Image (spheres, rainbow, N blue to C red):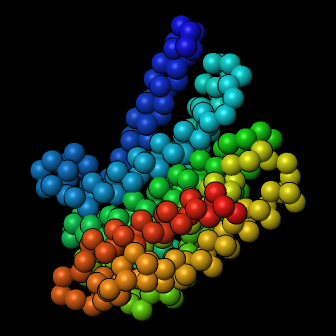
Amino acid sequence: MNLDIVISGLILIAAFYVLLLLGKLINDLLHREYRLNFELTEKDNAALALATTGYYSGLVLAIGGVLVGPSLSIVDDLIDLFIYGLLAIVLVNVSWYVCDKLILFKFKISEELIRDHNQGTGAVSAGMSIASGFIIFGSVQGQGGSVWTVIVLWAIGQAILILAGLVYEFVTPYNIHDEIEKDNVAAGVSFAGALVAIGAIVGLAAESDFESWAVNLPDYLGYSVLGLALLPLIRLLTDKVLLPTVKLTDEIARQDRPNVGAAYIEAFSYIAAAFIIYWCV
């Protein structure tokens, strides 16, 4: 490691944190219905903390994708970082509204987070941000693409996440919206894991060089369909292999105190399966 590499690295780190700060300011402007510092420090709002942590995790993934791969020069890296970093901030924030209007559409996320301190909602919001971060992470990598390529891949990814929400609702014996609205943290954690898994599969499928839509889009959609198709199987395997003596549905939605520990195992199984699928297929 020579001095030039160290200096370039420090400059990029500083630029990265500038973008994270900008991401915070934009998020604060978009959510004037609450004051983040007050909610976290005065009201100990763990639900909002969870959603916010997911938002920043999504930002780190999305912005970090710009820096993956060979470096041409520090100037080129900074230009790419700020162009695609700003785009990433916009897209991750729009993803929050996609979650609010099209995934958790039976209630308002902000009300659940601020009024009810609903950690299940916080988990799903975090999962959506991280899933979108993975999608952008893959979309900004490689050569041959453009800002429009990233936007289109992100938009397709959002549609796939919406579809994943519908599939998840279909394969679970309980109503996911009702359970989350009843402050069922376990239901939210499980659902969040499924969203992150689909986002990871879709995002990692997009990380190759962009040649043309005819070449890249079939692979992108193919991995997406595979992930959606395997959701029910993964849930079944979790039931039979990781938690063989219990039923996930009973632990998460059919007892007085939902089992958050079982939900963590289910969420892990989805995310682990996403990487296994990517490595093996």
Q: How many marks?
A: 0
Q: Return the x and y of residue 178 as percentages of the image width and height.
A: 34, 86
Q: Measured along the vertical axis of the image, is residue 16 above or below residue 275?
A: above
Q: Is residue 78 visible?
A: yes
Using the image, determine if residue 250 lies above or below residue 121. Answer: below
Query: Could you tell me residue 70's position as x and y percent?
Result: 69, 29
Residue for point 60% across, 24% down: 78
Vertical position of residue 40 compared to residue 180: above or below: above
Locate the C terminus by quadrant: bottom right
The residue that appears at 39% across and 54% down in the rendered structure is 54
| In the image, residue 207 above or below residue 161 | above
| Quadrant housing residue 199 | bottom right
Q: Taking 38 as reference, is 49 left or right?
A: right
**Extreme-left residue of the structure:** 42
Q: Is residue 40 left or right of residue 192?
A: left
Q: Is residue 55 left or right of residue 15?
A: left
Q: Quadrant of the N terminus?
A: top right
Relative image position of residue 58 (x, y in whole percent): 47, 50
The residue positioned 74% from the left and 68% from the top of the image is 222
What x and y, as percent, mark residue 214? Answer: 87, 60
Question: Residue at image x 52%, y 77%?
Answer: 234
* Viewer-nearest residue: 254 or 91: 254
Residue 166 visible in rendering: no
